[in-house]
Amino acid sequence: MISNQFFTGFLKMSHVATFVSIILLIIAILAMYWTGRKKVNFSSRMLISLFLGLSIGIFVELIFAKSANYINIGREEISLWYSLLGSTFVSLIQMMAIPVVFFSIFFVIVDFKGNKLGAFTRKTLFLLLGTTSIAAMVGIIITNLFGLSHSSFAGIIEKETSDKIQGLTTQNFPTFALNLIPNNITLTFSSNSAIISTVIIAILFAIATRFLITQKNEGVIKLVEILHSIKDVINTTLLFIIDFMPYAVIALVSKTIISNGLESIISMATFIGALYTAVIVMLVIYIPILLLAGVNPFIFYKKAYPTMVFAFSSRSSVGTMPFTIETLESKMGVSSKTANFVASVGTSVGMNGCAGVFPSMLAVIVAGAAGVNLNISFYFLVVIVVTLGSIGIAGVPGTATVAATVTLNGVGLGKYFDKVALVFGIDPLIDMGRTMLNVTGSMVSAVVVDRLESTMNMDKFNNKIS
């Protein structure tokens, strides 16, 4: 342990664990660079990066976890250094989210052929909300199977989480819905949590543009061509950023394990195991859905897992969205209109993990701890509230807290939120699985909608990954 102010205050490299972790990260980065030079395909590199991230995190914890200085100082220092790589990458991806959402929705409507936009939208919402309902049912069943329905994870809620909960507890549904309506374009475009507001603005602009095009307005036609070019620049910039994803995943996964500690995983093992079991069950449920749509689920998951790995690592559905769209279009043959529309809307509507499985699990646990009669009527109410509450919740880290608050308030149990306070202490660990499920559910919905629209390029879908 180095006590010099230069190392403790400025460099944040005062503990031996920090030096070891940085050296391990550099070695892992060099290994990933070597795989790139050897032309290892992107999907394989993502799996390797996930393995390296898990290995570094677990190794550092096993070696240093018994040191008080490591717990108090080392973890914080390592998290800061690993954020330099991991969080920087996520920030760059998130930087692209609002322009990608705006242009995606805008051009879906402007370029839409025919007069069936309403039917297309209904199919999208049906798939997104339908899978969320299924996810809520799975959450209820798994919670009971793991015997958590009468468990208590009571504890003290951190002030930041408590403030967020308090703000939502006093908010009714009409007010919540009203807050989704944008009143300032600049403020809307400056926040990744305002996805629904961005979608509304894009729809209004697109409808107006589509009308002016029908009026043969030459200025608007030229403007649309310029906007197409801007979208191409955005997409190309995005691809450049995505090339660095395997390096970022190493840091993101390692940081999550190190900053939370293995003891947190062990102490909440039953809940963590239940949530990840529910995630796996949902991934299995997607298989017959894909089969009914005439899509090979093995090929789907083979092409989807790099996106799933990044969603798992970044814990941000919005941050993953640009990569989700690129995967759907380039690898799976989903049409541009469907990929852009479903992936964009899916970051705020019908998130199967954060707004499906998780809030339903907490509702059952809290209800059991509060002495509520757990019967079919209550479970039906939970599914309805969870499904409706999943509309308009932005896919950024912390979203699940909002979804859980809305659900508990909806079933009349908001005042018992402290019964699950300990769950939020391990939120980053479970948020990884929830986010992966959010993104996977959106991709499944996009594929099914595109098959229903008969616009999916099955030759591209069946092509071998390069």
Image (spheres, grey):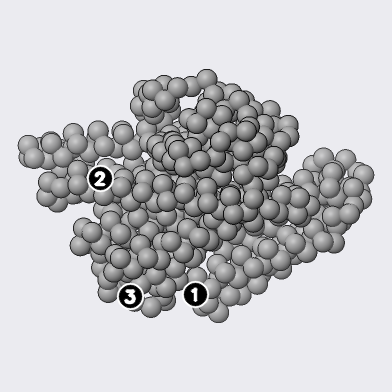
Residue 51 shows in the view:
yes
Q: Which amino acid is tagged 3?
A: Asn
Q: Which residue is mark 2?
A: 122
Q: Are marks 1 and 3 in contact (CB under 8 Å)?
A: no
Q: Could you tell me residue 152's position as x and y percent?
A: 69, 39
Question: Of residues 139 and 132, which is closer to you in this image?
Answer: 139
- Residue sitting at x 27%, y 74%: 459
Q: Position of 126 compared to 50: left or right?
A: left
Q: Which mark is first along the chain, 3 or 1?
A: 1
- According to the picture, the residue beneath numbered tag 1 turns out to be 41
Name the residue: 11% across, 50% down.
114
Q: Nearer the viewer, mark 1 or mark 2?
A: 2
| Residue, far left | 215
Position of residue 221 measured from the top left corner of the image (x, y, whole percent): 15, 43
Q: Quadrant of residue 34?
A: bottom right
Mark 3 = which residue? 462
How packed is label 2: few (under 14 Cα within 10 Å), some, or many (20 or more)? Answer: few
